Image (cartoon, rainbow, N blue to C red):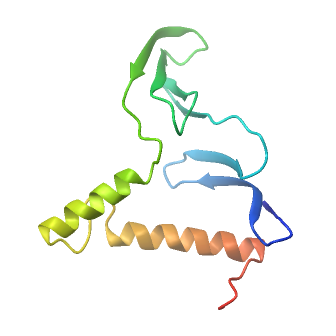
Amino acid sequence: MTNFSDLGVDEISHYMFRFPSGCIANISSSYNLKMNNLATIYGDQGFIDFPDFQKGERFTVSKHNGTNDIQETIEIVEENHTNGFIYQADEVAKCIHKGKLESTIIPIEETISIMEVMDTMRLQWGFKYPFE
């Protein structure tokens, strides 16, 4: 679901993905709506909180035994670049340096799968690029 601005830009969007494994992802984004910049990943043994998901260097792992009682909480500090695309750029540079035509981290088939999902989303929204 998305709301387009007068300029045709996806102003506010909400996505729900269901994966073959049974996992579900809910993602909300906006370029002009003040939103919390956080992420939480839930699993059957606990969850991970990223309170400042794009810029933050701290996240918390909370472990439980299948109940609401937290058994253990671990705070982790990890260097995080302010521009998340730096990791992709680094991988491209490594592949070029090694003469590789594709990355083993994200092979071409994975890129094609991601683009197919994006094309499906655009179709559902009724969004077309001017050249289409």
**Which quarter of the figure has residue 38?**
top right
Q: Is residue 82 above or below residue 74?
A: below
Is residue 105 visible to the viewer in this orientation of the structure?
no
Furthest-bottom residue in view?
131
Q: Nearer the viewer, residue 69 or 98?
A: 98
Q: Position of residue 16 (x, y in %)?
A: 67, 52
| Left or right: 62 in relation to 10 | left
Q: Nearer the viewer, residue 93 or 102?
A: 93
**Which quarter of the figure has residue 67?**
top right
| Left or right: 40 in relation to 114 | right
Q: Position of residue 5 (x, y in %)?
A: 83, 65
Furthest-right residue in view?
6
Residue in view at x 61 percent, y 75 percent: 119
Q: Position of residue 127 (x, y in %)?
A: 74, 77
Quarter of the image for the N terminus: give it: bottom right
Total number of numbered discs in the rendering? 0
Q: Position of residue 65 (x, y in %)?
A: 49, 15
Residue in view at x 13 percent, y 66 percent: 98
| Left or right: 72 in relation to 14 | left
Q: Nearer the viewer, residue 7 or 50?
A: 7
Residue in view at x 42 percent, y 69 percent: 111
Is residue 115 visible to the viewer in this orientation of the structure?
yes
Q: Is residue 66 above or below residue 121?
A: above
Quarter of the image for the C terminus: give it: bottom right
Furthest-left residue in view?
98
| Left or right: 20 in relation to 6 | left
Q: Is residue 12 above or below residue 46?
A: below
**Which quarter of the figure has residue 91?**
bottom left
